[in-house]
Every structure is written in C-alpha cells, then in structure tokens.
Image (tube, helix red, strand yellow):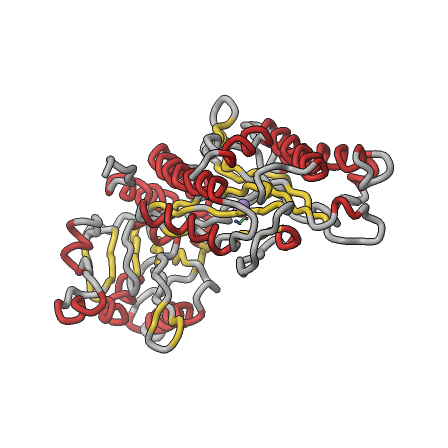
Amino acid sequence: MKKRPTITAKEYAMRREQLMHMMGEQAIAIVPSASMKIRNRDAEYGFRQDSSFLYLTGFNEPEAVAVFIAGRAEGEYILFCQESDPKIEQWTGRRAGMEGAVEIYGADDAFPITDIDDILPSLMEERRAVYYDMGNNADFDQQVMGWVNSLKAKVRNGIHAPHEFVSLPLLVDDMRLYKSAAELRAMRFSAKTAIAAHQQAMRVCQPNIMECALEAEYLHTFKQQGMDPAYTTIVGGGENACILHYVNNDKPLKDGDLVLIDAGAEYLGYASDITRTFPVNGVFSEAQAQLYQIVLDAQKAAIAMAKPGNTWEQPHNAAVKVLVEGLVDIGLLEGEVEQLIEDEAYRPYYMHKTGHWLGLDVHDVGDYKVDDCWRLLEAGMTLTVEPGLYISPADDVDKKWWNIGIRIEDDVVITKEGNEVLTAGLVKEISEIEALMRQAV
Ligand code: GLY
Ligand code: MN
Ligand code: MN
C-alpha cells in the first residue's frame, strides 16, 4: 500500500505542550477517552475515540484518562489506561498497556485505569485550576467531583484542593479549529477516498437500483482504504432528497428522479463531508437542471467568499443572495430580492446554514461568533460549503418543481491567499456529471 499520511508522535506532543502553555502552571487538565457502547446485549458498536482525547494523545483505546499537569517536574503527561493482559486481549484485541503508553504514545508515566481513584487526587493537590469538559459525561463528572471532595475533606491536614473549574474546550476547541499541515494531509486523503466513492456511485447508478445499493458502493470504497464513513451516509432519491437527514436508504431510485448523496470518509479521525446530487438516469431534466444550476452558482459564490478576513457569515449570505435571485427568476418567489432575503422568504426551500467547521468531528468544534460578532476566517480553518434547495409539494408551487431536492457540498480550507477546495477533484458541473455517468462500469 502507498505511504499514507500520518500525525506524528511529535505533533501530538506539540499539541500537549501548547495546551499546557495556555493552561499555565498550577493547572491540571483531565481528559477522559470515549467508552465502548452496547448495541444489543453483548454486541458493541464499533469504537470511536473522543475527538479531543484523540487530538491530544493519538491513543485510540477506550477506558483511558489523560492527565496534563503543566510544569510538574516528575512528568507532565500521565496516561491511565487498560493494562496489558494476554488472556483478555485474546478476546477483545491488543492493548498498548503501560509500556506502550510511554514508549509509543509519549506519556511521561502510565498507570492502570483501575488505580485512578488512588492516584489522581494526589496529582490534583496544590493545583489551583482544573481544566475539564464538565457536562459531557455525567458519570465521569461525578468521579471528578469525588476526587475534588476527597481533597477538600483533608484541608485540616494542610492540603489545598483546586478551587477553580475551567472549561477545557475553551482552549482545545480553538486549537482544533486551525488545522496543521499534517491534519490537512489527512483531510485530503479522506476527501480523495470520498471522491472516488462518489464517482463510483455516479457510474453504477441506474433506474431501479436501491438507495442502499449505492450506499454499499461507498462502504466498499471506504473499507478498501481501511476507512469508515465519517457519519451515516444519506442516499435519498426524489422526495427523499428533500428530507435533510434521510438515512433509511431503503427505496428504489426512480427513472426521472434526482438522487442526493451526502457521504464522507474518516481517516485518522478526520472527516470529509461531500454531497452531490445527480439524475438517476444520467440526464438532468430541464426543471432539474434549472434548479441545480442555481444551487451550483450559489455554492461557487459562497466558496469565493471563503477567504481570510471575511466573516463566517459572508459565504452564507452570498449563497442566499444567489439562491433568492434564482428563485425569483424561475417564479418560485415573487418580490424584491433584498426584501425576500430580509423576510427569509426562502426558508421553505432553503432551511439550513451554508456550512460548518470540519475536522475530527464532522460538525467540528470552534465558535462561530466571538464577542457576539461573526468570526473572521483565518488560514487553516476548514469548513464545508453546502447550499441546497428542497422543493416539497405545495399548492402554490408549480408541479414541475415538486420533490426536487438538491445540495452541493464541498470541503474548503482557508489559505493565506484565499482557499483550497479539498474536494475539488469531484465533478459538479451538469455536463461533467452527465459525462461521468455515461462511463460504463
Ligand atoms: N453530513 C452532515 C452535514 O452535511 O452537515
Ligand atoms: Mn456538512
Ligand atoms: Mn454533508
């Protein structure tokens, strides 16, 4: 297999260093991993690591807690994790154990997770502030409170318990918002795989194929690269394309309908998130082409506004303007464009925002507003641009538009000069889509 992008141990170490630098001395951060979740009785869901835990450790096992203690002479990074145990590992898979935690993952020290109640309170002693993501995991919240209270109970022995709780996401989410060169390489690789899957779906699509049969093409392409879907794949034909989070994917695709597919892969935890909409029979009807071109023009206008110095809202506003102008042109809206925008008259046809941050979470972390103002876009921020139009049947809507749902979604990183579309390799012009769909499989 060709060499694949990686995130080096050094980069994970630099992230921890940056976090501890921002926390300052006298602070401790506590970051739990995700846990296994039961799907039914003894069968579990596939494990997905907590994104911030993964960002800071690269450690992809459940039942672990990372602790960062800025300035601690005996070691700043402690990892509590599951012990190596050949008997258990024969059933549930290999573990890094204490040794791997130190040697592979760069922990200064590692302890069995079963010993955390005995060890962690003493690491919190004399620390002023605890950085922690409170409210995310009720059981773990209780455990953290228990550790603090156990220290408070010892104040008469001269022990100081931390007296300040600070939101860990306040620091980590902002770090995660700016993607490094290595993160972008991972995201390009994820995008490349998702692009190949979309191309394959366009080639095999034909009338009467099941929505789930197209979904299978994505799973096949992703798994060939050792990847999973970054989120549940949406394959919606005709009226199903107008249901934003349609995931049943259990209907046959009809001749003459459009199919909307929203699918992305996950590589090293990093998501791609791509939507394409194309005709089931390979040729857009006139009405479909008219609406499609409006969405495509809106998407291009939005991408053009995704550049440093513009606000988060500017790409969205650019998309809305083109969508409303188009809807007026074809008679789906009547009135002055500015007024229709102010009144949000487009919302029956376009009811979502034009994008979101993208990264380790599909809807990635990071504030969209700072001090009540839309955030300025900066190099390294990565977002989706995904306008759409969804026309449900209604008395005041000409029948020729009914059940046409269209979304076009690309992944964009802001660069110093403007932007790079990570998913630019995937066709989206009407003529390009029709040409690709003519290719035999
Ligand atoms: N695939 C989820 C989204 O587009 O937001
Ligand atoms: Mn999206
Ligand atoms: Mn999407």
At horizontal 43% and vertical 66% (from top left) the residue drawn is 137
Instruction: Determine whether, in the image, residue 300 is placed left or right of residue 7.
Output: right
> Considering only vertical position in the picture, is 44 above or below 397?
below
Look at the image and tell me in which quarter the N terminus lies: top left
**Residue 337 or residue 409, whichever sits in front:** 409
Q: Residue lying at the far right in this picture: please name it.
A: 335
Can residue 370 be seen in the rendering of this structure? no
Q: Position of residue 248 (x, y in %)?
A: 54, 61
| Lateral position of residue 94 relative to residue 426, left or right | left
Q: Position of residue 435 (x, y in %)?
A: 53, 30
Q: Residue furthest top?
A: 417
Q: How many numbered discs, if any?
A: 0
Rendered image quadrant of residue 376: top right
Residue 172 location (% of width, % of height):
42, 47
Task: Say which quarter of the image contains residue 243.
Answer: bottom right
Q: Residue at x 35, y 39 (%)?
A: 186
Q: Is residue 219 left or right of residue 68?
A: right
193 above or below 169? above
Seen from the viewer's position, the closer of residues 41 and 260 is 260
Q: In this orientation, does residue 196 appear?
A: yes
The residue at the point 35 percent across, 55 percent down is: 29
In-front residue for pair 392/112: 392
Ligand 2 is found in the corner quadrant, namely top right
Residue that appears at 18% across and 56% down:
109
Judge by depth and name the residue closer to the eye, 355 or 193.
193
Residue 140: where, in percent of width, then height?
Answer: 39, 68
For the C terminus, the quadrant is top left
